[in-house]
Image (tube, rainbow, N blue to C red):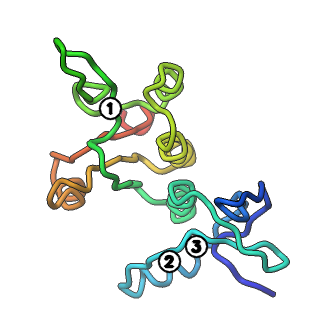
């Protein structure tokens, strides 16, 4: 029998992406063992079906599913933007500003941001995965700006952070 971190079902095949699958389960046994051993696993987001066919999966989706399987406290997504931003006109200038003044977004607000076009394109699976993780027990998720020096340290070891934090009201009360 084959063992794989991401058992998949087929979604579609495309010339650009190859076989694309949907995660049906994450077996976190190996990841937990590596973490317990003091290792930091680097995970390729490729899964396999029962016949041995390899499948691509969105890395943000995989990260969220791994966080859920590990019962993580926090999911951190590092990208090249300063969190969830909206386009704004200030005078004649077109600028991108945070969606909230305190960079906090309650997960129930996500659909409204999608409807307004603020969450679009590649942010849809990223933020969708964060919402899934939060609804399934991860306490918070955050998008941090990897261009900021030491952004991961700022996020994990200070109150400052460097992006947008998503949370569920029931987890913060």
- Structural crowding at the residue carrying mark 2, measured as other residues with C-alpha within 10 Å and reported as few (<14), some (14–19) or many (≥20): some
**x, y percentage for residue 52?**
79, 80
Real-space Cα separation, disc 3 to disc 2, in angstroms? 6 Å
Residue carrying label 3: 28
Give the answer, above or below, for where 139 lies relative to 111: below
Which residue is located at x 26 percent, y 29 percent? 96
- Structural crowding at the residue carrying mark 1, measured as other residues with C-alpha within 10 Å and reported as few (<14), some (14–19) or many (≥20): some
**x, y percentage for residue 101?**
22, 25
Secondary structure of the residue carrying tag 1 is strand
CB atoms of marks 3 and 2 within 8 Å: yes
Q: In the figure, is residue 6 to the left or right of 11? A: left
- Residue 51 image label: none
- Residue 32 image label: 2
Secondary structure of the residue carrying tag 3 is loop
Secondary structure of the residue carrying tag 2 is helix
Give the answer, above or below, for where 76 lies relative to 89: below
Which residue is located at x 83 percent, y 75 percent? 50
Dot 2 or dot 1: first in sequence order is: 2
In the foreground, 121 or 152: 121
- Residue 85 image label: 1
Image quarter of the N terminus:
bottom right
**x, y percentage for residue 126?**
49, 47
């Amino acid at each position: 029998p084959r063992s794989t971190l991401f058992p998949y079902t087929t979604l579609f095949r495309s010339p650009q992406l190859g076989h694309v699958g949907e995660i049906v389960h994450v077996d976190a046994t190996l990841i937990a063992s590596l973490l317990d051993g003091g290792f930091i696993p680097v995970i390729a987001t490729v899964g396999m079906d029962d016949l041995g066919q390899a499948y691509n999966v969105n890395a943000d989706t995989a990260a969220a599913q791994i966080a859920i399987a590990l019962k993580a406290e926090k999911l951190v997504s590092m990208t090249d933007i300063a969190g969830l931003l909206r386009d704004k006109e200030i005078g004649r200038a077109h600028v991108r500003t945070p969606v909230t003044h305190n960079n906090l977004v309650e997960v129930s607000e996500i659909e409204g941001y999608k409807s307004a076009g603020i969450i679009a394109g590649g942010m849809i699976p990223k933020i969708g995965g964060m919402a899934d993780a939060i609804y399934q027990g991860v306490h918070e998720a955050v998008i941090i700006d990897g261009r900021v020096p030491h952004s991961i340290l700022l996020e994990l070891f200070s109150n400052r952070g460097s992006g947008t934090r998503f949370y569920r009201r029931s987890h913060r009360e």
